[in-house]
Each structure stands twice: as C-alpha cells, then as structure tokens.
Image (cartoon, rainbow, N blue to C red):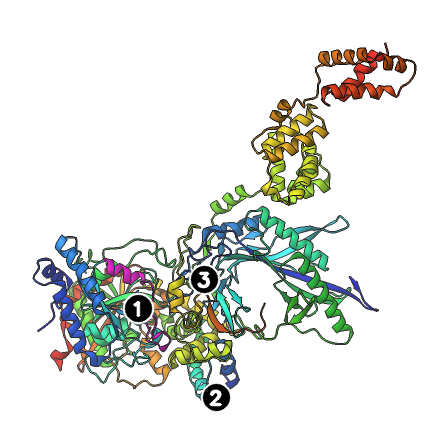
Amino acid sequence: MTASGKQQWEAVIGLEIHVQLKTDSKLFSGSATAYGAEPNSQVSWLDAALPGTLPVVNEQAIRYAVRFGLAVDARINRETVFARKNYFYPDLPKGYQISQMDRPIVEGGHIMISLPDGSQKRIGLTRAHLEEDAGKSIHDIYPQYSAIDLNRAGTPLIEVVSEPDMRSAAEAVAYMRQVYTLVTHLGICDGNLQEGSFRCDANVSVRPAGSQTLGTRTELKNINSFRFVERAIKHEIARQIRVLEAGGRIVQETRLYDADKDETRAMRSKEAANDYRYFPDPDLLPVHVSAALIDAEKAQLPELPQEKINRYTQSWGLKSAEARILAEDAAASAVFESCVAAMQHPQPVLAARWLLGEVSALLNRDGLDWPALPVAPVRLAGLLDAVASDTISHKTGKTVLEKMWDHADVTAAEIIEREGLAQMSDSQALAELVDKVLADNPKQVADYRSGNDKLFNFFVGQVMKATRGTAHPAELKTLLEDKLNT
Amino acid sequence: MTAPWHQGLKTLSGQLRRGELSVAELVAESRQAVQKVAHLNALISRADDEAVEHQVNLAQQALDKGTAGVLTGVPLVHKDIFSTRGLRTTCASRMLADYVPPFDATVVARLKTAGMVTLGKANMDEFAMGSSNESSYFGPVKNPWDNQRVPGGSSGGSAALVAAGVVPVATGSDTGGSIRQPAALCGVTGIKPTYGRASRYGMIAFASSLDQAGVFARQAEDCALVLSAMCGHDPLDSTSDASGPVDYSAALNDSLTGLRVGILPQWLANTEAGVAAALEAVQQQLQKLGAEIQEVTLPTADLAIAAYYILAPAEASANLARFDGVRYGHRCQQPENLDDLYCRSRSEGFGEEVKRRILVGTWALSAGYYQAYYHRAQQVRRLIAEDFARVFQSVDLLLAPVTPETAFRLGEKADPVSLYQADVFTIPASLAGLPGLSMPAGFSQGLPVGAQLIGPHFSEARLLNVAHQFQQHSDYHQQLPEARQ
Amino acid sequence: MTITRQDVEQIAALAKLRLAPKDIDSVRDSLNQVLSLVDRIQTADVAAVVPMRHPRDATQSLRADRVSESSRKAELMALAPATDGDYYLVPKVVDTE
C-alpha cells in the first residue's frame, strides 16, 4: 500500500511473461532457433510467409508447455486450438501471429512467492498459451529505414499470464524471479535475459485502498530485466497516483519504460486502436494432447525448487537459507546432489557448507558459474569424504581443494597420499613420536611438570611440526596428557 | 483432326511406349495448339523452352528405359495458384505479377515426379475469387464454346484449355466450386477431391478450410489417373489426410447395379430448362445402368452461400495479410511511411473483388460482429455437413446440377452478389468438405451443361466410377468446340 | 445490419487498404449488398450447435523437433523489393520498442 498525502492507494499488478522455449527448431518450421546467427539466415519459406506455405506443429513445444502446466498445477487442455491474431507489423511476416485464444494449452495454476517477512503468497495464473515469436526490427542501422531480421520469427514462446494478484513492484519482481527459476529448472527455457529468452509486460493500475473495483490500467511493454521491472512498475504506480491526486484520469494505453531517463512514456501509435480479430487458424487442426504425452512429461518433471527446499531442510537438515540458494540454482543443486550421492557416507550438511563456502569462494575468485565448475562432483565427494572421516582437517581440505582446482584429473585421495597430508591416526606411530619429542626436550618436560601449563602447546607444536600437521589434534592431546601427567 | 490425347491418356501412353509418338512431338503439338487459342487468354505464363525441353528429355529417357508410368510425357498446365519453382506464379494478381517461387507446390512436384511436362500457368480469377474468370489482373478468359461468354471460375483458364482440346490435363483448385463450375460451363470433366485428400502446400491460400486441389481432363478415366498421382498425405500440410495414395482407376469399371443415387428436386426446380433436361437425361441413363433414384432434401443448404460468404472472406482477409510489400510482391513507389507502404502496396496490388472480400472478412471477424457472423456461420456450416451426413445414410451419392444456368455473357453479372449465386449448387459440398465431380451432361442452346456428383468423404473412386460408366454411354465429353461452330 | 461510411473507413484501416474518398460510398453499397446476402444466416436455428471449425474431424499431426532447413537468405533477399542484402527494409518505424 502506498501512502501519498491523505489518500491511501493500492497498486494492482498482473504480469504477462513471454518465455522462449528451448527447442532446436521453430514452432511451425524446421528452421534453427539459435541466437546470434547471420541476419535472415534462419528463415525458411514458411518463416518468410511465402505464399502457399503451411505450418506444422513442433511436438517438443507442446511437451514443454505441458511440462510448465504440470509444474504450476494447472489444467492441461486435452484439445488445444491455435488461433490467428491479426495485425500488421514488418517483423510479423504473415500479417498475423499464430497464438491461442479459446482453449489455450494451459489454464489456471499458481506460483508461490516469498515475501520479505518470510511469508508465502499465492499468485494465480490465468493461462499459459503457445505462440510464435516475431522477428526483430532494427532501427539504428539506417536513418530512414527500419531493417527487418526474421531469424527470431516463429521461435516458440509460452505467454504466462498472471492474475492481477500482485500489490507492489517488489511482489512483481519476486513473482518474475519465481517464474524464471521454474522455467530454467524445468529445462524449457535457456533463461538468457540479454538474448530476450525471458521478457515481461506488466499491467498496472491503482485504486483507493480498500476499494474492490479495478482502476484503469496501463500496459508496460518489454521490461526485460528484474531491475527494470521493479523500477518501471514503481515509476508507473507513482505516476498514476500523481495523475489521480491532481484530479486527472488514467488513460488505458501502452507505455514504454525508458531505462536511460528512468521514466515511462506513452507509445504514440502502434497498436492504438487495434482489433486483433482472433479466429481459429484453419491451417491447423486442434492439437490432441494425449494422456501418454502428459504421463511422459509428468515422469520427466524435475523436482521443483520448493519441493527441493523442503527436502533439503526436512530430510537433510540444511538451514533454509542454504537450501534456498542451492535449490533455486539448477546447476548448483545438481552439483550438490551429485556430490552427496557420490560420498561414501553422505553428509549433506557438510557438502552444502563446502559448496556455499570454499567452492563458491573459488568460483567467485575465478568469475565462474556452477556449470563451469572445474572440479567434478565425484572428485569433490572424495574430498568431502576425507574431511568427514577426519582423514584431513578442514584447513588441509582447503589446500587440497585448491590443488584439485588446478589439476583436473587428480583425486583428493591422490593428493593426500602424495603429499602425506593424512592425519596421523595410527596411535602406535603417534605414541612413538610423542615419546621421541618428550625425550628430546627434557628441560621443557620438567618445567611443565613443575607447573608451567603453557608449555603444553609447545609439545603440540613440536609433534605437528614433525608430522607436518597431520597428527589428529584430539588424539595428540590425549596422548600428551597421558604421558606428561604420569 | 483431333489431338493424340483425345481418346484418353491410356491410349496416348500406349503410343508413347510403343514409340509411335515421341514426347517431344507430343509436347510440341500441345504447345502449338495452345498458341493457336491465344485469343482465349487462358494462359498467363508459358514455361520457357529450356525448362520444357529438360522435362521432355527426362520423360523420353524414362520411356526408353522402360521405367515410365502412364503419365510420363503427358503435357499439362497448372492453374496459376500453384507455386512452380522458377516459373512465375501470379495468382492472376498484380500483387504477384513478378513473383517467381523458389519451390514447387506438392501437387506440382508429384505430377513432375510422375513424368508430366508443365507447359505453363493457366489464367484464373484473382486469388481464386470469382466465378467467371473476369477478376484476373491479366484479363478475362473466354469460353471456347462462345467467345462472348465466360468460362466460369475461378479455374477458368484450366477448364478452357482442356475444353479447347489443346492440353489433355490441367490442374485447378476449388474453394466454393472453382473446379466444378468452370468444368460445367466449358464441358469438361473436373473433380475436387475430399478436403484433405490433396496437399495444399504451395497452393496460394484463399480460404484454408475450403481450398482443395483437383484436376480437369476430358474424361473421368483421365482424371482418375492424374488424381492418383497427386493425392496422398503430405507432411508439409498438416490438414492433409494421413492416408497414402489411392489408385482411383481400380474401381472405374465397377457395376452401377444397386447404386443408390439421390436427386434434389428443390435444386432442379431452380435451374433453367436446358440444364434440368440434361440432368433428367443423366438420371435416366444411370437408371439404365442399374442405379436406383431417390428424391432427397438438404434443408439447410440454402444457407450455404450466406455462410460461405462470411467464412471464405474471413479466412482470406488473414491469408492475404502477408502481401504487404515487404518480402515479395508489389511494393508501391516511394512510401512516405510504414502505413503508406502497406496501404498503397495493397491497394495497388489487389483488384476490386479481392479488396471487397478482404473488407467483408475483416468486418466479419471484427469485435462486436464475430459472434453474430463468423461464429454463427461456423454453426450453419455444421448444420449443412450434418444434412449431407443424414442424406448419405440413405443414398450412396447425389446427382445434382453444377450451375443454375449455362455460361453467361462476359460482363453480364456486374454486381457481385448476382455472381455469387453462380456457386449455389457447388458451395454446400465445399462447406462439408465433400468430394464433387462435374461431368459433361449435354448441351443447351449450344452451350455445355454439367452434372454434379457429390459423395461422402473419400468417395472419389465411386464418383469417378459413376462418371466413367456414364461416359461409356455418352459422347458429350468428346465434343470439341470447333466441331460445333 | 448495414454498414456506414465510417465503418468502411475503419475496416479499411484495419485491413490496410486505402480507398479513394470518391469510392467509399460505392464500396459501402457493395458491402451492404453482400451483407444482405449473408444476413440470411440470422434465420438459422443454431442453438446448441457446435461450430464447425474445420471440415476435417481430425487432430493435428505433430513434427519432431529437428532442424531440417538451411539458410535461404540469398533466394529470399532476391525476392524482396527492398533489401540491403542482409535485411528487409521498410520506412522507419517510429515509436519503437
């Protein structure tokens, strides 16, 4: 709720998120979808809308959309229909976009977001429908022309439409992050924000606090980073409140966020009075989503982040902050789980602390992401086993990790063996060494026995020096106490 | 003297195989004959000599090696709605006056594979929107039986060339009657198969849920041969039926004994006398061949034109949105801005009838009218399809007029709505997606009359069988215009 | 149902067709003729009739996710009325995203 002057205002926000699906080929043609190709080189006859060409649906896109629907607990429409959305724009070759209107593939569902106070809020989803992306219009090559690249035209998207359930820019961002985490986890989107794989429009309105009727909304277009979404929505809320408090009215319009000027402004022309004239695409029959397909996707459904967090905290004893960091990053949680699985005596808490501590520190130092981790999880597990079994100390473990970091093919065991880093836990050998140290330092032994307790640490130091730090500290202490005090 | 294909493709194929005629001679004869009827304005583009020669050589080699099929070396023209790689494809529009497709339509590719030799592209109504071939950017086609009259449309050029006897085969497309109506008005055999039987890939779309490719020839037997080669599932057209090719020749000689033929007295009552008389004669002939005649009704069929002129323009309004002056086709000079580029390119590129239908379709889909028009028209469409389904529980096929009258004069139906009525008997089957065949049924005052056979889905073989049996006992399909003049 | 001059202008704008002012009345008249023809469907009893979206009572066959196309850039650019060899060119679009 936003206070401004006497009146209390409440913002009402709904998001439409365009999620590019990670298919190899386009939604309706066999053209590649790779980013960054030479302009107009991934354009088939169909993508250029040559007369007589016809769309054929990519099954993988259907599967990805179903997977999303299952993950948000939505209804999957078993017969889903493609429709034409008609408007003219140079990057829309057919003069219509193939999208969905009635019977979208996914209806309903919800996403849980975490609020700063630690509570959870449920954001309802209206629908998620399949559609094709447009091409790109490039305006800064020529002064008098816009240049059109159709490489992106026809790339499959799902448009995830939320209910107007969010009440602040912060909630909107939390929701957007949650959707992002989900689609990257599901493996249906590469999540590359710079390349436009995940784009967001926001519908924003404000109303007097306590009112049940919705105010007139504006649509903020193409706000494609988490930071911009938050700022754009904040600005728009503030602008609407300013207008209303000055006695003005909000005009239903599309506004663009200008990141440089940090403000939103109305678009002048484009879709001013558009009437999209949706109708079922007669080139495409209804798609039957079979029970077999749904079952196969269900079986493939990875554990969702929230489920993972619960498992990490409840079954594995992680702290919730640790669990969240690992669970929300698909690559990190994959490393974590492989590590735990590969340990001889799995200790998830130890593994989590090492990954979030020492391993993260080295990743940061080298500017690497989890997928680029130089030490394979199986090798990490070997290291963790050595620490867990007290073969080496935590401190020695760090040294071993650094050596493993730089030598891809060496195991922890090999390093420990080669460099004699294992803690000396052979009691007989250690006892002999202690005897030797005491025999070599009779003066100090006498001083200690006459009351100089501080000398105890001197003997520890001498033994550690002789063993190059591999003596097991607790065992050494017991031995020394036994020998000195008799 | 009649052309070597006049007795049918089987006879022709025998001559080619035995070496009594070379492919080069055959093709040269057809090309010259086409030139001689240039006054009909039936051809928009001629295939160039080199391309023809190449196809001729391939066909001759196949014949020499003994790998030829029955269609090898047979010349044909394609309606200019089918994309032909390297050969201008205009759809009879200024919009595409210079458009040379980089790929072949599936129908074109299949007939090429069968060894047929493409001579050129036949004139038609612009974007297949018309029933008289008068909306072509390249001017009207004339009916070979009377050059003052229309050949019908939209596949007017295809029908006229086959009727004139200058090519043995032409392809066509039928959205609301565009094969059957010109076949009737020109006195040739034409078949539109079941929707989904022939691939639409590469056929420039008018109304996607209605468009269907088909074929013209003198006789049903030849249509069967060509249809067998062009039909079958195409992975590039997801609305094409999943079944593979069918041999439509196999059942041509089946007996008609016990065949249940439905007739529609209400339709016959709305035809001119000469047409009704010819239909009556066909009915008697079929009875002689063993068929049983039953009177039936299609109560909702009189709403078909109304539903069609909502649905087809609505689909067309979207299908023709791609013609925007950006990637191919006509672009206006010196556009002031983007909107000017769109509006002027499209207004200059499209003719009057095309623009009218785009406007009607845009209106029918627009907010506020969708339910009352588009949605309701789809409901009416189902009623019509159900009417047919009911009728086909008691009869095997329908015998009906193709048109209410014979070929009318050029310019006679200037107002669009009176022209729309020309398809009153062909549109119902189109809406239901049913196969329809038009066969020569006689003459009225020197002009051909057609009889229409309509069957249930995928009954093409039956329709061709009935037409073939009729043609064993009639010679209307063998009459040539000059013999009558 | 009848269409007005203003309706004609609005539909033409949606369809990106430009009509000369002198032609608008005749276009309106011919559209109204067509409308009087198609308005006959208003007489049909369609209560509870499921709209027939397509003549084929079948469902869509699906395609495997495989890249089957290679670059057609040269051929596509050759078809286009205005390009720089890399891009299609249109008059500058104002108010961009």
Labels 3 and 2 positioned on one and the same chain: no
* Residue extending farthest top: A486
Residue A314, relative to residue A440: is it above or below? Answer: below
Nearer to us: label 3 or label 2: 3
Residue B426 figure quarter: bottom left
Whether the magenta-drawn stretch holds residue B314 is answered as: no
Where is residue A482 shown, x and y percent of the image?
A: 82, 12
Labels 1 and 3 positioned on one and the same chain: no
Q: Which residue is tagged 2?
A: C21
Residue type, numbered disc 2: Pro
Q: Which residue is tagged 1?
A: B173
Can you say which quadrant of the picture contains the N terminus of chain A?
bottom right
Which one is in front, C26 or A319? A319
Whether the magenta-drawn stretch holds residue B94 is answered as: yes
The magenta span reads B86-113
Contact flag, marks 1 and 3 (Cβ < 8 Å):
no
* Residue extending farthest bottom: C22
